[in-house]
Amino acid sequence: MTTPGLPLRQLLMALGEPLVELQAAPAGLDVPVRDVAILDPEDPATAQPGELVLAIGARGRAALPALRAAGRAKAAAVAVKLDGPGQADALREAATEAGVALLSVRRETRWEHLDSLARAIIAGPDAPEGGEHNTGDLFSLAQTVAALTGGIVSIEDTSSRVLAYSRSSDSDEVDDLRRLSILGWQGPEPYLSKLREWGIFQHLRSSDAVIRIDPHPELGIRRRLAIGIRAGAQPLGTIWVQEGSRPLAPLADQALVGAARVAAAQLVRRRRELSADVRLTQTLLTGLLEGSTGPQSLATHLGLELRRPATVLAYAASSPSEGSDLELTRAEVTGLISVHTAARHRSALLAPIDSRVYVLLPELPAGLAMVTVRDWAQEVVLAAREHLGVQLRAAIGSTVDGLAAVPESRAQADRILDAMGRGGVATEVAALIDVQAEVLVSEVLALLQERGGLRDPRLTALSAYDLRHGTRLAESVLAWLDALGEVRVAADALHIHPNTLRYRVRRAEQLTGIDLAQPQQRLLAMLQLRLPAEPDQGHS
């Protein structure tokens, strides 16, 4: 399927005059640019429709074959480096004749930089003017980052215009730079000059690393963390975290790394948050997790490798506290999971399905230890409890050989969460290898609970007898069975005398007619007596 491409006009606006300059556009500036191709001087001159052809090493008349080939193929434009104004005249004439746009590239520009930048722009970022960002998502992200870092957050574009910011309950915590930025005014010039002098802005435009900025009480400025938001080599904006009345959280740097990646994904979307591409990604991901869509569609759409290891994490939250908003809680939990996961795995994909949130980790590094993934999930659970007051359970599906087996990993994670929900697994983060016995027993108990015909009516009657008479016969039998018949061990667990336990076991056998010397009856009793007691229907 052919992509619509980005109009040449918008590509030129994004690249800017420092990198390229338009020399000719015989077909106008609305021709779509769909891809970037590098033409080496050793290669034959070829092109594809809609391509921006970077004619490396071809100067002067040596670039003529590239222009002609691009014109024949209906390419969008050819970019060359010029040695002098005389070359420009000849190439402009050739470009006009060929019907293809001609761009001149500054001599000091590195071709690989121009290539990566152009690809990033074509791949998704909005044009620098007229774009509409989904500020609702950005405000939610800012609030999530504020909760994770313990600071006051603002998200800005490359022109230092505030796109979104976190709420602050205490106005005394907000410094002058934060206040003036939100009002749309320029911050204190002495401070901005210092930032330029220290190379802060240059760092944020060119690096993915978090930078720390010391406080300046004399300027009314508190300590800050900052990170650039980038798509490939293209800067999209910045996330700033101002320290309030308390120190920032120890893992604030990690939260910012994840937040920058999440923000980049949001900022490169087209005018609407649920663009066709975003909807398609969610549909394909959900279909893959549910097994209704094959892996090839998602792999092709996102450029993923089919046969690299992958795993699924599944999260389930407890019910929100009284008075809290269910939808808001879900949005905050989803935001927190996305930030933490993006910080750990760049290609992670997230899909809320019903009451659970699934994270697909594709293209895992070879030899990645399960304990590492468990640590990632544990970080999310701890952060949700600390920052949102939400109890999360996390299940880790098996690591599978490729995307085709992702439904198996998701099904395994669901089994663990189901067992956790039934109380059969005590831990809050688990993989099946940790709790296989607990999960299997929980599933057998669920089957016994649902299908009364599989239960022994004598054991059902024993539990009902206890309810009517206030006795503890069933509990005592189960404790004795769990202790493998060791009377003293079971009696100690129940805090009763061994003779009392012996009496209760004999009494239970007399009332029900069960022979606990039989292995099959002992096995069924160990399982069924773990079910919640129900009133007896006619047995005594």
Image (cartoon, grey):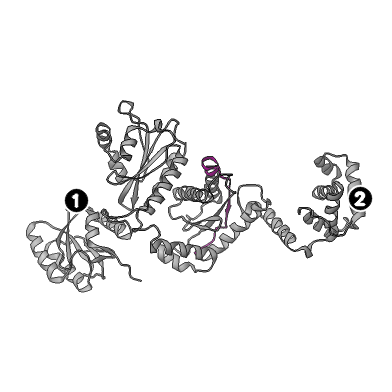
Residue 301 in view, yes or no: yes
Residue sitting at the far top? 218
Q: Choose between 93 and 43: the one closer to the eye.
A: 93
**Along the horizontal axis of the image, is 197 left or right of 424?**
left
**Along the horizontal axis of the image, is 458 left or right of 11?**
right
> Is there CB contact under 8 Å for labels 2 and 1?
no
Total labels: the figure holds 2
Give the magenta range.
382-403
Residue that badge 2 annotates: 507
x then y, percent, for residue 527: 77, 56
Give the residue displayed 43% in from the left and 52% down from the top.
346
Residue that badge 1 annotates: 18
Residue sitting at the far left? 86
Label 2: which secondary element: helix
Residue 262 in view, yes or no: no
x then y, percent, for residue 400: 54, 61
Could you tell me the amino acid type at mark 1?
A: Pro
